Image (spheres, rainbow, N blue to C red):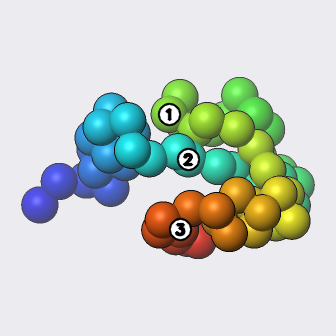
Amino acid sequence: MPLHINLLTRMKNSGHVKIYACTPTMQMVNIKKEDLMRDADEMASATTFLGVAADAYVALLV
């Protein structure tokens, strides 16, 4: 079974997936932008993510 990071990378490389990092969660656990995996497209608040997700075909919040 592939590692989750490999699955995310494969999905991202398909061109059909965008990865958002949750800024409130990042602040809560003291993660900085440079700590994120290179495949993360952008950082977003919950409000921003919900706006994007409303227009998406499928949205997953993990």
Q: Is residue 15 above or below residue 21?
A: above
Does any portion of residue 37 appear in the rendered image?
Answer: yes
Residue 60 or residue 27, whichever sits in front:
60
Numbered disc in front, either 1 or 3:
3
Left or right, residue 57 beside residue 55: left
Q: Nearer the viewer, residue 18 or 26?
A: 18
Q: Residue at x 28, y 50 (%)?
A: 7
Q: CA distance from mark 2 to mark 1?
A: 7 Å
Q: Residue at x 78, y 63 (%)?
A: 51
Q: Are marks 2 and 1 in contact (CB under 8 Å)?
A: yes
x, y percent for residue 24 = 86, 61
Q: Circles 2 and 3: CB distance less than 8 Å?
A: no
Give the residue number, with chain letter if any, for mark 1. Answer: 39
Q: Residues within 10 Å of mark 3 (few under 14, many from 20)?
A: some
Using the numbered discs, state the Cα–Cα distance from disc 2 to disc 3 in whole angstroms.
10 Å
* Residue closest to the far left: 1
User: Percent from the top left, x then y, of residue 55?
Assistant: 64, 62
Looking at the rendered structure, the kind of residue marked 1 is Asp
What residue type is disc 3 on?
Ala
Check residue 59 in the rendering and tell me which mark sits there, or answer none: 3
Residue matched to label 2: 19
